[in-house]
Every structure is written in C-alpha cells, then in structure tokens.
Image (cartoon, rainbow, N blue to C red):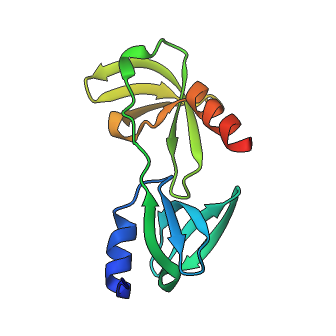
Amino acid sequence: MGYTLDEKKAILKGLNIGDIISLVDGREFEFVRMKQTKFIAKNRGVAYNVQLAAFKEVVRRVEQKQFDPGTLKQGDLIYTLDAQQNPVIYRFKYMINSNRMMAENPVTAGGVRIDMSLIKGSVKELEQQYATAQR
C-alpha cells in the first residue's frame, strides 16, 4: 500500500526517536527527527537526510519510558535533548514542584529551571544506551 507525501509526513511526525522504519529500497533505519521536507534517520550510527518519498512503512515502535524524578539525588547528572537531538547535560539540584526542577549547567555553574517533560533520563541511562548501540 502506497502513501501520499502528505500521509507520509503525518506518519513521520507521529514517530518517536528510535522507531524503526523501512525505506522503499528495503533498508531499515532508526528515526531521529522530522524536518520541513525531509527527515533524519540513522543506519549503523550514521545519520542521513532522507527525502519523504523514500519512506515506506513503520517496522517497529520503541517503547518510550517515562523518567522518574524520585530516583534523583542532589548532584546526579541528567540530560535533555536539543533541537538536533543531541544530549544536553545538567546537574540536578532539587525539585521546585511536581513538574519542575532546579538544575545547574556543570560547565558554567549557572542555574536553570527545567520542566520535567523535557528531562529524558539520567546520564547513567544514556551511557548504557550508547554502550548497547556500539555493540
């Protein structure tokens, strides 16, 4: 079954980082993010700009786990993702309320309030994901 370009764009916009997709040539990629007229996908650790027309179907969706702030101790390293999906590291200080925390940039020592929806996990989890991806 073929999709129109608008349908392909709508499907890709609904994907999460790490979902596995296939292209019309049969290769499988890990979805990273959507752009205006293309999307970024990884194959064997290399990121590619891919045309919308090359998308065929979603092969497998990854399970997105929620980060539990109750596991944090003062000084733990946490990360968010920037616009290019690169991790940005902060040092946890304390919870402001149930959905915001106070953290500091470990390089500049500047304080920053972060909404909990932006926190992707702890740096320990990120290290484990990276080690698994390198195998």
**Occupied quadrant, residue 117:** top left
Q: Residue furthest right?
A: 135
Q: Up-down: is 21 above or below 102?
A: below
Front one among 31 and 3 = 3
Q: Up-down: is 21 above or below 78?
A: below
The x and y percentages for residue 48 are 65, 70
Of the 4 image quadrants, the one containing the N terminus is: bottom left
Q: Up-down: is 1 above or below 49?
A: below
Q: Up-down: is 56 above or below 28?
A: below
Number of on-image labels: 0
Front one among 2 and 33 = 2
Front one among 5 and 90 = 5
**Residue drawn 32% across and 80% down?**
7
**Occupied quadrant, residue 100:** top left
Task: Say left or right for 128 vs 70.
Answer: right
**Occupied quadrant, residue 106:** top right
**Residue drawn 74% across and 41% down?**
135
**Residue drawn 66% across and 62% down?**
43
Q: Residue furthest top?
A: 73
Task: Say left or right for 102 vs 47.
Answer: left
The x and y percentages for residue 56 are 46, 77
The x and y percentages for residue 19 are 47, 55
**Residue drawn 54% across and 81% down?**
24
The x and y percentages for residue 27 are 62, 71
